[in-house]
Amino acid sequence: PVRNLVVKLDRDLKPVKSANLDRGWKTKTGVQDVAAVDGEIYLFFYPKSPTDPSCVVVDEDLNWLRTVDLWGGNGVKALPPRFGKSKYPRFLVCRTYGVSGSDVLPLQAELRFVEIRGGKAIDLYDAGL
């Protein structure tokens, strides 16, 4: 199992603080992507099973805040306010599907705009926002 140890570095890349984000669930690898919104840091993992969280939210001091139902292992970027004002954090999420070299299941990429509400990812297109 992967220990989900996260280290905060200063500008000289020296460790300032570390936090073990292990809460009894498993991930396939360590943090895959990071996004920050309003003082909260979103850390994205490849979960080991569908019941394990794929996103953990911590504050700037790496204190555990919550998990979020948003998979972002292929890329996540926080959206600036010019992409629509909202009191909720918004992200551009990239997901890939398929198998490399397969004619039956060719590789595909999907970009989605999502908003986090109550720990759930809301697809902005599907929600008509």
Image (spheres, rainbow, N blue to C red):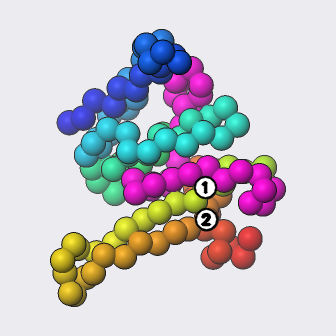
Amino acid carrying mark 1 in the image: Phe
Residue placed furthest toward the right:
85
- Compared to residue 109, the image places residue 61 above or below, namely above
On-image quarter of the C terminus: bottom right
Total labels: the figure holds 2
Q: Please, what secondary structure does the residue beneath circle 2 have?
A: strand
Position of the N terminus by quadrant: top left
> x%, y% of residue 14?
43, 13
Residue positioned 46% across, 72% down in the render: 110
Q: Which residue is mark 1?
A: 91
The crowd level at tag 1 (other Cα within 10 Å; few <14, some 14-19, many 20+) is many
Residue 54 place in picture, x, y as percent: 41, 49
Q: Is residue 67 left or right of residue 1?
A: right
Q: Which residues are magenta?
A: 57-85
Q: Which residue is mark 2?
A: 113
Q: Does residue 119 belong to the magenta stretch?
A: no
Give the Cα separation between the discs numbered 2 and 1. 6 Å
| Above-or-below relation of 72 to 63 | below
- Density class for disc 2 (Cα within 10 Å; few <14, some 14-19, many ≥20) is many
Label number found at residue 30: none
Which of 79/25 is in front? Answer: 79
Contact between marks 2 and 1 (CB within 8 A): the answer is: yes
